[in-house]
Amino acid sequence: MTRDLPRDWTGQDDRSLQNALRHGASRRDLLRMLMTGGVGLAAGGTLLGAAGRSVAATPTRGGHLKAAGWSASTADTLDPAKGSNTTDYVRACTFYSRLTFINETGTPQMELAKTIKTNDAQTWYITLRSGVYFHDGKSFGSADVVYSLQRHLDPEVGSKVNAIAKQMIDITATGPLTVKIVLSEPNADLPTILGLHHFAIIADGTTDFTTANGTGPFTCTVFEPGVRSVGERNENYFKPDGPYLDSVEFFAIADTTARLNALLSGDIHIAAKINPRAMRSLEGRAGISTLTTTAGNYTDLNIRMDLDPGTKAGFIEGMKYLINREAIQKSVLRGFAEIGNDQPISAASRYYNTELAPVEFDPERARAAFKKAGLLGVEVPIVASEAAASSVDMATVIQQAGAQIGMNIKIDQVPADGYWSNYWLKAPIHFGHINPRPTPDILFSLLYTSDAPWNESRYLSTSFDRLLKEARGLTDETKRTDIYWDLQEMVAKKAGTIIPAYMSNIDAYTDKLGGLAPNPLGGLNGYAFSEYVWLNT
């Protein structure tokens, strides 16, 4: 049986609402538009709410925006294929465009693609926008898409999404503005996958990333890895409504207090990812607002199963019993979180396994497991850093619980600069921080398959790999959900990753800023804030 793409994959409904709101349409007008267009009230309410929040005020043009994130390093890159932290994602969204954009409802909207169609979820046909130009004046076309996507398949490139991209076994330009993609097996999530930051489109033949030559809303004028980036408005941008800013500057301030102080003093307009402990300092502060979203990002404790002490039978089990999740949720995260159950799919996803209970805090069972592993009283180092949000505080909770049962846990706190290059994925026990992803397949493919680039605990299971591949091509949602539930249980019980909580993301910003909105890809409008926000004078 064949099928075409659902109508809303073209993104017309949401875009029409946005434009109508900007031109002063009333709520009654918008509801009439929804009903006339055949959109159900439930779906219409979601679109209406999303559109209304993002354009509640009239955008104004002009101004230089300064925003501070929390992670950066000298390994920062303008190559979207190699992006591995939030500063990389911000730059990818600022200087480049993607074939699709994932809006705040999780629906892929058309961006550089005009249409994406398929009859079987395995062979896909993409028609591209015309009249789009790169920053150097080169015309955008199918050769750029083919080159950009094929790079992810080249081991020499070192793409962070190679495990996802290699399902594309044939990427062919069928015309100046048409592309055909054939997958190794059906995958109904392809339009969503193409909306990931890594799949930003670069010009055909690009090998030099000392600057960025994209089709995005801003042109790159300054790029200093580990320091800052500056972009100026792309006057030839293909979208008529943006960007609103004249220029945008983005850099990282690793220390939460320093980042918040920079906002309070007026040195910056946005302080991303505020530590929940700092929320009290914002109470009663005039001129400052916050946006809180729980989209599924988390800080996890990773125990490598191929290195000691992770190879000791009972050690991982003991660590899971030693985690006081409620204390982390209430004390460390100040209630801005939901209890986690050691797998990456949060309750924000319709595929969340509601029957998978978190491991209970049980010091005595932890003691027995550590004794079985021969590690009771032995010093066990855990690497933590401000780079992995709240990990130092989480490590302290774990250390204190261990001390009560004779477990000697040592916290190795290391600098934020260089953490993701030198410690993450490498240290025997360390913390990670994973940003939200829009589908279970993307999360599992990046983090848990045998060939996953970010397999934090070195979890290996051929059964897991086989089931994930099966779920990828299913259009039967009941069967797909059943498999995703099984995969969540496998990870929670067998992998060496411990996810105590799904954290709320808190972005603090000046009241002069408009347009900041939630997005399932993470804070700061899914890191695409530069295109959508504006400054009120």
Image (cartoon, rainbow, N blue to C red):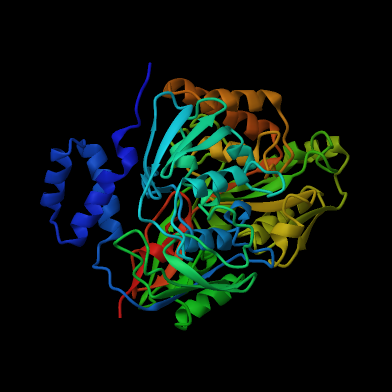
Instruction: Please report the residue visible at 82 percent of the width from the left and 39 percent of the height from the top.
Output: 306
Q: Taking 184 as reference, is 8 above or below it?
A: below
- Residue 51 appears in the figure: yes
Residue 319 percent across, percent down from the top left: 73, 43
- Residue 343 appears in the figure: no
Q: Quadrant of the N terminus?
A: top left
* Of 476 and 63, the residue lying toward us: 63
Residue 376 percent across, percent down from the top left: 85, 44
Q: Classify residue 320 as left or right of residue 289.
A: right
Q: Taking 242 as reference, is 317 above or below it?
A: above
Q: Classify residue 250 as left or right of residue 81.
A: left
* Of 101 and 57, the residue lying toward us: 101
The residue most toward the top is 1
Instruction: Please report the residue visible at 48 percent of the width from the left and 82 percent of the height from the top.
Output: 267
Residue 270 percent across, percent down from the top left: 45, 71
Q: Taking 34 as reference, is 530 above or below it?
A: below
Q: How many marks?
A: 0
Q: Classify residue 472 as left or right of residue 455.
A: left
* Of 452 and 347, the residue lying toward us: 452
